[in-house]
Image: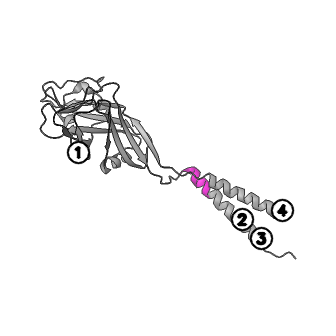
Amino acid sequence: MKRFYQLAIASTIVGFGLGTLNTAQAATFTQTASDRGWWAAEDSLNGSNSNDNLNYVTGNIRGIDSRNYFTFDLGNLVGVTSATLQIQRFEGSGNPTETLDFFDVSTPANVLSQKNNSPNNTIYNDLGSGKNYGSFNVTTSGDPNEILNFALNSNAIADINARNGNLFSIGGALQGDLVEEYLFSESGDQAFAKLVVDTDSTPVPEPSDLGGIMVVGVGGWWLKRKRKTSLIPIL
C-alpha cells in the first residue's frame, strides 16, 4: 500500500509537469487599419489633402494622380503564414478591369498620417514601388459595399513577421497610363479596411515550458530511483 501511494504521488508530479507545457495553436487574427488615405503626385492638378480624410482612392481622378496606403498595428503577431488585405469596393471608373498592385512602404507611419503635406512625389513614388506584395485584376464596377479580398504574397508575409510589435503600412497603386481611371472613390470614415492573418502552430518556448520540462525530468528521476530501491532484497 505504501508503494502504491508513492507511485500515485510520482504520477501526480509528472502530470503536473505536462500540464504546465504551453503549445501555441494555429489561429486567425483580424487587424483594423489604424490609419488609411492617399497621397498625390506633385504634377497633379490639385493634390491637396487633409489629415482627417480617410478616403483611400487610388488612380487618376479629376486630374489628380493618387496612390493609397493602409497602416496596421501588428501588436504581438508571430509566426504569420498568410495575410489577406480586405477593402470595401466603393466606386471605380475606367476600363472594365484595372490592375492594382500593392507594395512595401518605407515612409514612417507618422509621416504618412500627415496627409495635409500632399502632394509629395517622394511619398507618392514610395507607395507604388519597392517590394511587390501582389498584383490583382479588379473590376471597376460592382456593389459599393462588397469587400474585396487580396491575398498578399510571401514578400508581405516576411515583412509582417519582421515588423512584429510595430506599425506596418501597405501602399496601393493602379498600373498603366491612367486618365480618369480609379478605384475606391467615395471611401470615407465608415470604410472597411482590415488585415486578416493566419499564424502557424509551431510551439513557442516560454519560461513555463522550461519549468514544466524540469518538473517532468525530476519526476522521472525520482520514479526511477524508487524502482531501483525497491529491487534491493530485504535482509
Mark 2 and mark 3 lie on one chain; the one further toward the N terminus is: 2
N-terminal of the pair, mark 1 or mark 2, is: 1
- Alpha carbon distance from label 1 to label 2: 60 Å
Helix, strand or loop at mark 2: helix
Task: Kindly tell me whether residue 127 is visible in this rendering.
Answer: no
Badge 4, how many Cα within 10 Å: few under 14, some, many 20+?
A: few
Q: Earlier in the sequence, mark 2 or mark 4?
A: 4
- Residue 31 in view: yes
What is the magenta range? 206-213
The image's colouring method is one colour
Q: What residue does disc 4 label? A: 2
Left or right relative to 31: residue 216: right
The residue carrying mark 1 is 130
Label 2 CA crowd tier, 10 Å (few <14, some 14–19, many 20+) = some
For residue 229, which numbered disc appears in the image?
A: 3
Query: Which comes before the other along the chain, label 1 or label 4?
Result: 4
Residue 147: % across, % down? 33, 35
Q: Mark 2 points at which residue?
A: 223
Distance (Cα) linking label 2 and label 3 = 10 Å
163 is within the stretch colored magenta: no
Considering only order in the chain, which callout, 1 or 3, is on the residue closer to the N terminus?
1
Quick check: marks 2 and 3 in contact, CB under 8 Å? no
Image quarter of residue 234: bottom right
Secondary structure at numbered mark 3: helix
Instruction: Using a 10 Å C-alpha cutoff, classify the residue at mark 3 as few (fewer than 14 neighbours), some (14 to 19) or many (20 or more).
Output: few
- For residue 207, above or below residue 168: below
Rendering quarter of residue 70: top left
> In the rendered structure, which amino acid carries the disc numbered 2?
Leu
Q: Nearer the viewer, residue 140 or 99?
A: 140
Task: Name the residue type under label 1.
Answer: Gly
Residue 23: give x, y in percent of width and height. Answer: 54, 52
